[in-house]
Image (spheres, grey):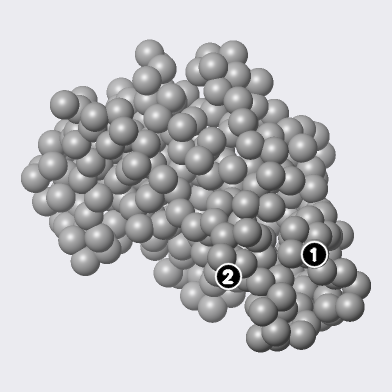
């Protein structure tokens, strides 16, 4: 029975990944933050020695961009230094383990190249993007030094388990509350902002596939389609049989000053080498998320 070690297992991706791996007959070790604080190099080393994993999935991160404004040092400590600590622990104690790192499309910032692929230069415009870019470069260096270290450059991916601070979940929750008569309005920032949104369950499958590939590489995981926040609004309200026009308000205070743009991914490498492709449609994903909130 292969053993998988997952950091950040309590989050959306970690929970789906753990279920996927258990279905494939893995022993899954998913330590909590108290057991394996990635900012504590000694704790990381102890956890890895105890687990002796075959595969490591590094998903632990401060992942909401808005949190960076409150504590950018903490974001860098978790997202960048935490990754460095994990790499060091693997070198010291589990050099044969295969490592997957969850990177982000925000490493690209506002790229001129559309769509983006694994060769697109990093040019982040947020602290979150900066932290993920630094960590991804650390993964590449570890790979050059002989560690089996792969990165998934993950574009936005959602599910009914998405954190409540993220805009897709915020919209779906608000629609359900409006339908139930618990609130009247939904305040949003820039509803014209567009993203490449996929289904988290498709993306965790890509994580696993990346570690089954004979060589460690970087892979973009994306749908290749752009949709706007307004698209999310209209689908969610329609799912609840409501007219969004009577409830949505634009709040300038919710606008992000350093908003990434033109982020749409080219996942042709993952399709070609891993046989990966997104299965869920954008519409079906938002409908499912809304129905889950209504329930």
- Residue that appears at 49% across and 30% down: 206
The answer to which of 64 and 181 lies nearer the viewer is 181
Look at the image and tell me in which quarter the C terminus lies: bottom right
Tell me if 137 is positioned left or right of 122 in this view: left
Residue 112 percent location from the top left of the image: 81, 39
150 vs 243: above or below: above
Q: Is residue 4 above or below residue 132?
A: above
Q: Is residue 219 above or below residue 181?
A: above
**Front-most of 185 and 219?**
185
What residue did someone put label 1 on? 241
Pick whichever of labels 2 and 1 is earlier in the sequence: 2
Task: Give the side of residue 58 with respect to residue 197, left or right.
Answer: left
Residue 225 occupies which quadrant of the picture? Answer: top right
Residue at figure coordinates x 35%, y 58% from the top left: 10
Q: Looking at the figure, which quarter contains the N terminus? A: top left
Q: Identify residue for label 2.
A: 165
Percent from the top left, x then y, of residue 119?
Answer: 64, 27
Please report the residue visible at 11 percent of the width from the left and 51 percent of the height from the top.
46
């Amino acid at each position: 029975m292969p053993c998988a070690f997952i950091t950040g297992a309590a989050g959306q991706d970690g929970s789906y990944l753990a279920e996927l791996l258990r279905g494939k007959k893995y022993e899954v070790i998913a330590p909590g933050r108290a057991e394996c604080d990635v900012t504590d190099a000694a704790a990381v080393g102890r956890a890895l020695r105890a687990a002796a994993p075959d595969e490591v999935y590094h998903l632990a991160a401060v992942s909401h961009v808005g949190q960076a404004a409150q504590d950018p040092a903490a974001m860098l400590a978790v997202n960048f230094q935490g990754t460095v600590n994990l790499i060091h622990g693997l070198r010291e104690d589990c050099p044969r383990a295969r490592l997957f790192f969850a990177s982000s499309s925000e490493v690209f910032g506002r790229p001129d190249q559309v769509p983006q692929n694994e060769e697109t230069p990093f040019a982040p415009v947020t602290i979150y993007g900066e932290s993920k870019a630094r960590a991804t470069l650390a993964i590449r260096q570890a790979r050059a030094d002989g560690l089996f270290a792969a990165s998934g450059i993950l574009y936005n991916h959602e599910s009914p388990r998405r954190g409540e601070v993220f805009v897709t979940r915020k919209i779906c929750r608000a629609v359900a509350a409006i339908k139930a008569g618990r609130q009247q309005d939904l305040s949003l920032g820039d509803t014209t902002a567009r993203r490449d949104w996929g289904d988290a369950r498709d993306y965790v499958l890509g994580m696993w596939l990346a570690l089954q590939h004979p060589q460690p590489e970087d892979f973009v995981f994306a749908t290749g389609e752009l949709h706007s926040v307004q698209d999310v609004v209209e689908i969610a309200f329609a799912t609840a049989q409501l007219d969004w026009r009577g409830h949505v308000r634009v709040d300038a205070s919710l606008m992000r000053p350093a908003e990434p743009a033109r982020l749409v991914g080219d996942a042709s490498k993952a399709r070609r080498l891993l046989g990966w492709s997104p299965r869920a449609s954008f519409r079906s994903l938002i409908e499912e998320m809304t129905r889950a909130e209504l329930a």
